[in-house]
Image: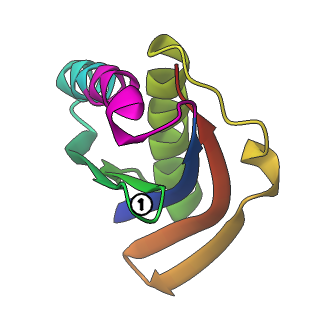
Amino acid sequence: MNVHCTWRFAVSGGAGFEECLPGLDRLMGHLLDIEAEDLRLSDAALAFDADAGVAEVSIASDGSTLDEALLQADNAVRAAIDAAGGSTPNWASQERLIESENSVTFTRGQLLVS
């Protein structure tokens, strides 16, 4: 089963937009490295709305079940955030919205970048 996962985070870590960019760039770089090593992952992306202070991180994952695909995507994004020096203090309490059979969005997350 192939599923596209998106995480929406409120971003903290600097006084302004420019201070968040290096951390977000590192996050994307690590996510691309993880994707290159795991053929089950594809289409990694990151978008940042500086005015709203919101980042979206997304990746597609292919697993034998929805739960397996979600776990792979979850592990990849979490590992990339950690490798980039970021943190997600409320990771476990994010809301999961299954938008369709192949699309899942996680909301109400917080991403701290340095």
Who's the residue at 24% across and 22% down the image?
29
Nearest the eye: 42 or 58: 58
User: What's drawn in magenta, residue-wise?
Assistant: 13-28
Using the rendered image of the protein, determine whether residue 31 is visible from the camera's viewpoint. yes
Nearest the eye: 49 or 32: 49
- Say whether residue 9 is left or right of residue 4: right
Disc 1 residue type?
Cys
Q: Quadrant of residue 51?
A: bottom left
- Say whether residue 13 is left or right of residue 45: right
Who's the residue at 42% across and 61% down the image?
6
103 relative to 12, above or below? below
Instruction: Find residue 41 and report its horizontal and vertical position in percent.
Output: 27, 40
Q: Quick one: SS at disc 1?
A: strand
Q: Quadrant of the N terminus?
A: bottom left
Instruction: Find residue 50 and report its horizontal and vertical position in percent.
Output: 36, 54
113 relative to 58, above or below? above
Magenta portion: prevailing SS class: helix
Using the rendered image of the protein, determine whether residue 1 is visible from the camera's viewpoint. no
